[in-house]
Image (cartoon, helix red, strand yellow):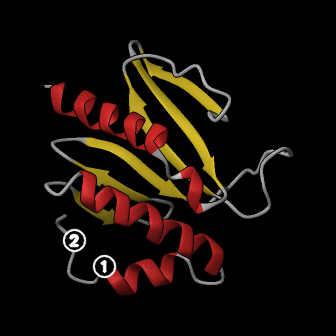
Amino acid sequence: MQLPEHYPADVLFFFDGHPAELALYEALFRAMEQAFPKGRVKVQKTQISFYGRHLFAAASLPVRRRKDWPKICLVVTLGLGYRLDSPRVAVASEPYPGRWTHHIPVSEEGQIDGELMGWLREAWDFGESKR
């Protein structure tokens, strides 16, 4: 996976004061790096973005935490051409017709599983198919 020059320091800064969420992100990154070796990563102010030809996923700290969310979690966001029907999806919106954004809280490493990685693979494929 292609990383920016200051990636390690930027990730540590992003998760400053959130060691449990950093550990979740590191587990997610290992899975993403293995699944999407041609991908790129960009650490931004509010999220860490994953790109192929286009943005297909992101990881972030919850900004507006819903009452039913775990106290410690990482939010994995992915884009698909349809709305996912799963209780794991906390929030889904359709910012453009036929483009759905899904926010999935991850509170333990075991939730970075085949189902989540399958959705991320679909998001990669969806992003790669866009013009």
Q: Label 1's element?
A: helix
Asked if residue 24 lies left or right of residue 117, the reply is right
How far apart marks 2 and 1 lie (CA) works out to: 6 Å
Q: Residue 101, relative to residue 1: is it above or below?
A: above
Q: Can you give x and y, in whole percent of width and height, for residue 88 in the image?
A: 64, 35
The part of the image, by quadrant, that contains residue 90 is top right
Residue 39's disc number: none
| Proximity of marks 2 and 1: CB atoms separated by less than 8 Å | yes
Look at mark 2 in the image and give the residue it sits on: 3
In the picture, which quadrant includes the N terminus?
A: bottom left
Please name the residue shown 17% across and 57% down the image: 37
Please name the residue shown 57% across and 61% down the image: 109
Q: Can you give x and y, in whole percent of width and height, for residue 4 in the image?
A: 22, 74
**Numbered label tally:** 2
Local crowd size for mark 1, using a 10 Å CA cut-off: few (<14), some (14–19), many (≥20): some
Asked if residue 112 lies left or right of residue 67, the reply is left
Q: Residue 75, relative to residue 100: is it above or below?
A: below
Look at mark 1 in the image and give the residue it sits on: 7
Q: Amino acid at mark 2?
A: Leu
Q: Can you name the residue that lies furthest to the top here?
A: 97
Q: Amino acid at mark 1?
A: Tyr
Q: Can you give x and y, in whole percent of width and height, for residue 12 in the image?
A: 47, 84
Local crowd size for mark 2, using a 10 Å CA cut-off: few (<14), some (14–19), many (≥20): few
Q: Can you name the residue that lies furthest to the right here?
A: 67
Please name the residue shown 17% across and 33% down the image: 128
The part of the image, by quadrant, that contains residue 103 is top right
Q: Nearer the viewer, residue 113 or 44?
A: 113
